């Protein structure tokens, strides 16, 4: 059975205490979901240490929202892969549009981070997506294919199978204006086809996904789950979203 993955991107939400309370409520609700469903929670860095013990021996994996490509050094304010691994982080979101827009993340730094994550045994979740202007100009596919090729440049076929991709149209993020599943499918098929070796790579949709619209996405052949922001913040709501897609 193909993989179905839901990753929660909490952005700058939830203190360590909020995180512990969320997991108390959330974990029992997802314990009985089918085994092929993978769940990842990516809290802010400072909430990672509180999530880690709660997630041990559960089906839910721990993610981070970014990391540096160097393992250590004079990079004030940054966090490295070994620091994340020490607290049980198995996944990292790279190239999120908010990081590209506000934190100077570029195709080149995303590429470096993807390599480091893979070398360090952390699964990269690589986000790509177009602005509304790019969509209106008809260059969505060209843009996201370019971002995908740049991020995955020169990876071996084996490594391509260890990556998770996320298509997140920027105009759909946090706006309540989700991209129609058929439109997302067309873009995601182009992403899958842009490099050899992506046949087994999971591709997630992100952008105003919720419990009402999720089934339409996972019914598409090239959509393997979701990267969920706002609708992942409430334990019951996020558990319902996952259940709506998988049961
Ligand atoms: P959203 O965010 O679900 O709140 O639109 C998704 C994301 O930015 O990853």
Image (spheres, rainbow, N blue to C red):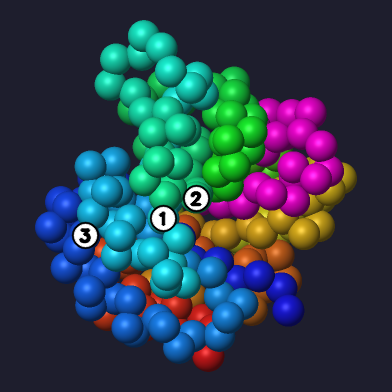
Identify the residue position indicated by label 1 in the image: 62
Question: For the residues marked 1 and 3, what is the alpha-carbon distance in whole angstroms?
Answer: 12 Å
- Residue 229 in percent (x, y) is at 35, 57
Q: Quadrant of the N terminus?
A: bottom right
| Sequence order check, earlier mark of 3 and 2 | 3
Identify the residue position indicated by label 2 in the image: 90
Please tell me which residue is depicted at 75% across the width and 45% down the height of the picture: 160
Q: Is mark 1 within 8 Å of ligand 1?
A: no
Question: For the residues marked 3 and 2, what is the alpha-carbon distance in whole angstroms?
Answer: 17 Å
Q: Is residue 40 visible?
A: no
SS of the residue under disc 2:
strand
SS of the residue under disc 1:
strand
- Residue 204 in percent (x, y) is at 57, 59
Residues at discs 2 and 1 in contact (Cβ within 8 Å): yes
Occupied quadrant, residue 216: bottom right
Residue 188 is marked as none
**93 sits left or right of 37 in the view:** left
Q: Give the range drawn in magenta.
A: 147-170
Residue 19 is marked as 3
- Residue 223 in percent (x, y) is at 64, 66
* Disc 3: CA contacts within 10 A as few (<14), some (14-19) or many (>=20): many
| Sequence order check, earlier mark of 1 and 3 | 3
* Disc 2: CA contacts within 10 A as few (<14), some (14-19) or many (>=20): some
Against 52, residue 153 (above or below) is: above
Occupied quadrant, residue 196: top right
Task: Answer whether residue 128 is magenta in the image.
Answer: no
Please tell me which residue is depicted at 71% across the width and 73% down the height of the picture: 2
Q: Nearer the viewer, residue 59 or 103?
A: 59
């Amino acid at each position: 059975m193909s993989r179905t993955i839901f990753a929660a991107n909490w952005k700058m939400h939830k203190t360590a205490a909020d995180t512990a309370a969320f997991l108390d409520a959330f974990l029992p609700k997802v314990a009985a979901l089918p085994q092929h469903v993978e769940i990842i929670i990516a809290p802010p860095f400072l909430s990672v240490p509180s999530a880690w013990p709660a997630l041990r021996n559960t089906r839910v994996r721990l993610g981070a929202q970014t990391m540096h490509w160097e393992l250590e050094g004079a990079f004030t304010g940054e966090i490295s892969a070994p620091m994340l691994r020490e607290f049980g982080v198995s996944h990292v979101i790279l190239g999120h549009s908010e990081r590209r827009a506000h934190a100077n993340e570029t195709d080149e730094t995303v590429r470096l981070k993807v390599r480091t994550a893979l070398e360090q045994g952390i699964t990269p979740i690589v986000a790509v997506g177009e602005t509304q202007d790019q969509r209106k100009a008809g260059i969505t596919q060209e843009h996201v294919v370019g971002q995908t090729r740049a991020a995955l440049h020169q990876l071996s076929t084996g490594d391509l199978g260890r990556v998770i991709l996320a298509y997140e149209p920027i105009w759909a993020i946090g706006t309540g204006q989700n991209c129609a599943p058929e439109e997302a499918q067309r873009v995601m098929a182009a992403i899958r086809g842009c490099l050899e070796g992506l046949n087994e790579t999971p591709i997630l949709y992100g952008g105003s996904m919720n419990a009402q619209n999720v089934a339409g996405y996972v019914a598409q052949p090239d959509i393997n789950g979701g990267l969920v922001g706002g609708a992942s913040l409430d334990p019951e709501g996020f558990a319902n979203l996952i259940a709506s897609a998988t049961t």
